[in-house]
Structure formats: C-alpha cells, structure tokens
Amino acid sequence: MNQPCLDLSGYHSPMNLAAALNARDEGIDRVMDNAGEWKDEAISELEKIWVQRRHEDNPFTFEMLKYPVVSKIGKPHSENCWGGLAQKMVKLGWIKCTGTDIAKSVSRHASLVRVYRWVA
C-alpha cells in the first residue's frame, strides 16, 4: 500500500527552496565576511593546490583540502568557512561537484559530503 509515512496536509510547510538557498547564501556571506584575512590567505593556498592538481582526475572531498590549508595558515574562526571556500572555488571554476560520499573525518560524524573534481 502506498501511503505517506506522515500526513502533513492542513499544516503550514516550512519548506521553501528559494528561501532555504537565500538563507544558506546569507549565512555563508556572513561567516566569510567575519573570516577577515584568513579567507584571503586560504583562497591563496587553495589556488596553489588547484594549480598543482587541476589536471588530475581524482575525485576528492573538501575535507581532504583542509589539512594542507590549516598546516599553512591555521584554522578558521568557524568550521562553516570551509563551505564558503568550496562555494568560492566552484564559482571560480576551479572545482565542480560530481556527487556525494560519507565523510571520513571523525569531526564530521560520517555525514554526507560533496565529492568534487578539479577543473583545468
């Protein structure tokens, strides 16, 4: 029998994709604005990595890029900066999302993460 697990008819739905995307973008903008010089240094480090690896065809998650950046410039003020950097790299055309995987770092608690490929 094909019945919904939960009947929400008659209730106001808080689901609104446009509003959700806007809230995401506002949050990313806010966290990146508060990142100060760290953001610029991180983008510079990520550009170096992109120049070295842009012709590789190996899939990766953004969590794999954290250690090389942190080892050079330290941690950001918020873990949310990593999402802002990933979004920036996509907009710059350095990487593209190709799917999802399960995070391997303990701090991510095996959550779902995006998989990327380098763009030459």
Image (spheres, rainbow, N blue to C red):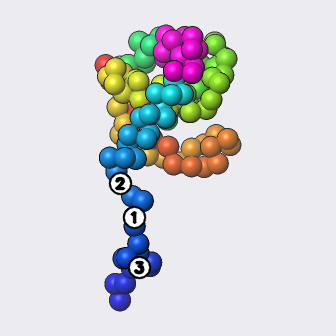
The residue where tag 2 is placed is 16
Instruction: Give the structural element (helix, strand or loop) at label 3.
Output: loop
The residue where tag 1 is placed is 13
Label 3 or label 1, whichever lies nearer to me, is: 1
Q: Is residue 92 above or below residue 8?
A: above
Tell me residue 17's x, y (percent).
Answer: 34, 50
Q: Which mark is residue 100?
A: none
Determine which quarter of the picture holds residue 38. top right
Task: Please state which of residues 64 and 7 is positioned toward the viewer in this rendering.
Answer: 7
Q: Residue at x 51, y 21 (%)?
A: 33
Magenta region: 33-46
**The C terminus is located in which quarter?**
top left
**Residue 113 appearing in the image:** yes
Q: Residue at x 44, y 34 (%)?
A: 26
Q: Is residue 34 above or below residue 96?
A: above
Q: Determine the residue located farthest toward the bottom in the rendered image.
A: 1
**Amino acid type of disc 2?**
Asn
Q: Main secondary structure of the magenta part?
A: helix
Looking at the image, residue 45 sits to the left or right of residue 57; the answer is: right
Asked if the residues shown at circle 1 and circle 2 are in contact, with their CB atoms under 8 angstroms apart, the answer is: yes
The crowd level at tag 1 (other Cα within 10 Å; few <14, some 14-19, many 20+) is: few
Q: CA distance from mark 2 to mark 3?
A: 18 Å
Q: Is residue 10 above or below residue 45?
A: below
